[in-house]
Image (tube, helix red, strand yellow):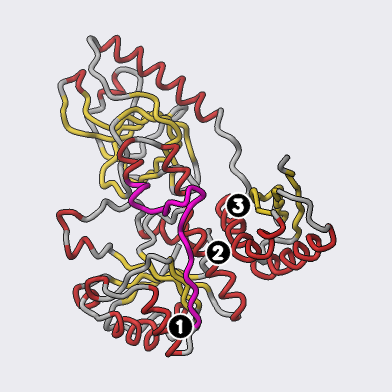
Amino acid sequence: MNSAAFGVDDSAPAAARNAAVAIGNFDGVHLGHHRLLAVLRAEARRLGAAAVALCLYPHPSSLLRPESAPPTLLWPERRTRLLRESGADDVAFLNTTRELLELSPERFFEEILVAKLQIQSLVEGENFRFGRGRAGDVSLLKRLCRNAGVSMIAVSLADDDESAVSSTRIREAAARGDLDEVQALSGRRHRIRGVIALGAQRGRSVGFPTANLETIQGLTPAPGVYATLAHFDDGRRFTGACNIGPNPTFGENATKIEVHLLDFNEDVYGQPLEIEFVRRLRDVKKFASVGELLSQIGRDVDASRQAIQAMPPEPIQGELAVTIAEWVRWDSAAALRPLGISLKGAAFTEPGVVRLEWRFGGRPTPHVVMDLLFGMEERLRRAFPEVDHVTTGTVTDC
């Protein structure tokens, strides 16, 4: 998806001006970001403005401390797509340069946010830092916004365990090969993107041809064998068994990414390919013979096919359902909490229809609850035009 980029000396793109804005690196576009974007979207609709995610790219550490800069989870095109799916109307990239990083918090606010973007509202996480040396915090930002006549909302990025969801936690989980943790924090399965290159073609000679990926974008997970889905840019996808790491059986120590695509026989050298990691099957190991290796590859292929077949169906507009759940909590939690009511979850049951599951911890007066929920549902439909109808279900704690 298209997005606009600009620098400290450039005019901001028209689509990013006079908007409700959230600023960040947004690497990961995780559940904490979903919560932030849900509030941003609601604030934008209140103002009749666009909801704009402003990405600082690349990560400031790549300029200030390149030797210790964190690996990137999401390349710009995927970051843009996920931000839009999670509630942003537009995405703009502000080029991270030394000149930008030298701006004091006050100059960053005045020159970038007020003069260039002409922001109407700002929505940020409670731990947001900005300006030279990361000297600015949310308290300073609130004061600057108040003086400029700009509304400002600070959002908690804590998850249900009261610990902050962060891209750092996702990177650490991916580095361990913990796909469940990555999905729990980000709300989706991990992906990388690369270009299919010509390899040794050893796999073809033994009946398991592989696509060798180079020019990798995204964070490569821990070495091992994975059940995967492979996505071509034309929309086709295939089940795959992916090996990440060396090939010790043949005395090769270099780390490679090789994907065997099931039920596939085409020449695709030079084409881009995205790999979606579904399940980690095993560690990389050295086998005593080529025959033993081929037997194991056969078992890996069977395990990959079974893992993909066992995948639960994806919810309709699944990313948006997460956003709606966070919007509902932001909108109504304060009013419903004293009545012992909390949102258990939200999901699309069919296009345009969202079902909200509520947990009742007490015995509130029915008409009070219905009035509150009816008002919330009306606001939800105004905030999310994609929603035509809202249904509800309840769980009562005993």
| Pointer 2 residue | 38
Crowding at dot 1, Cα within 10 Å, few <14 / some 14-19 / many 20+, comes out as many
Bounds of the magenta segment? 151-171
| Pointer 3 residue | 317
| Pointer 1 residue | 119
Q: Amino acid at mark 1?
A: Ile
Distance between mark 1 and mark 3 Cα atoms? 29 Å
Q: Which mark sits nearer the N-terminus, 1 or 3?
A: 1
Secondary structure state at the residue bearing disc 2: helix
* Residue in the image at 45% along x and 62% along y: 1
Name the residue nearer the viewer: 319 or 157.
Answer: 157
Q: Position of residue 5 (x, y in %)?
A: 35, 72
Quarter assignment of residue 137 = bottom left
Q: Which mark sits nearer the N-terminus, 3 or 2?
A: 2
In the image: residue 158, left or right of residue 11: right
Q: Amino acid at mark 2?
A: Ala
Pointers 1 and 2 in contact (C-beta within 8 Å): no
Q: Is residue 162 magenta?
A: yes
Task: Mark 3 vs mark 2: give the one in front.
Answer: 2
Asked if residue 262 is positioned above or below residue 338 in the image, the reply reads above
Secondary structure state at the residue bearing disc 1: loop
Asked if residue 213 is positioned above or below residue 43 in the image, the reply reads above
